[in-house]
Image (cartoon, grey):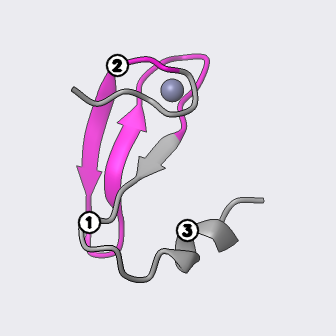
């Protein structure tokens, strides 16, 4: 089961598109996106987008 790394909740909506793969947290107090890369390439891109 997926567990949110930010709030610890387990209600998540899996999301995938051409560049993004992960789970969107459905907790109203959180709403963060937990990005996952199955083949661990190009992880640096995620760090840059976090203000
Ligand atoms: Zn969360």
Report how far apart the C-alphas of labels 2 and 3 lie in the structure: 22 Å
Magenta-drawn segment: 8-32
- Label 3, secondary structure: give it: helix
The residue at 50%/34% (across/down) is 5
Q: Residue at x 48, y 18 (%)?
A: 27
On the image, the x and y values in percent for residue 28 come to 54, 17
Q: Give the residue pinned by disc 1.
A: 17
Q: Image quadrant of residue 6?
A: top right
Q: Secondary structure at mark 1?
A: loop
Give percent across and percent down for residue 17.
26, 66
Residue under label 2: 10
> Toward the viewer: 39 or 15?
39
Packing grade of label 3 (10 A; few <14, some 14-19, many >=20) is few
The number of discs equals 3
Residue 45 on image: x %, y %: 55, 77
Classify residue 39 as left or right of residue 40: left
Mark 1 C-beta to ligand 1 under 8 Å:
no
User: Where, quadrant-wise, is the N terminus in this rendering?
Assistant: top left
How many neighbours does mark 1 have within 10 angstroms: few (below 14), some (14-19), or many (20 or more)? few
- Residue furthest toward the front? 40
Residue 46 marker: 3
Q: Are marks 2 and 3 in contact (CB under 8 Å)?
A: no
At 54% across and 38% down in the image, what residue appears? 32
Residue 3 vs 48, above or below: the answer is above
Horizontal side of 9 relative to 37 (left or right) equals: right
**Which disc number belongs to residue 26?**
none
Q: Is 21 included in the stretch rendered in magenta?
A: yes
Q: Which element carries disc 2, helix, strand or loop?
A: loop
Mark 1 vs 2: CB contact within 8 A: no
Earlier-in-chain disc, 2 versus 3: 2
For the residues bearing labels 1 and 3, Cβ distance under 8 angstroms: no
């Amino acid at each position: 089961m997926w567990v949110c790394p930010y709030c610890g909740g387990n209600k998540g909506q899996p999301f995938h598109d051409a560049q993004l793969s992960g789970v969107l947290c459905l907790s109203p107090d959180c709403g963060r996106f937990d990005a996952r890369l199955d083949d661990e390439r190009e992880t640096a891109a995620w760090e840059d987008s976090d203000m």
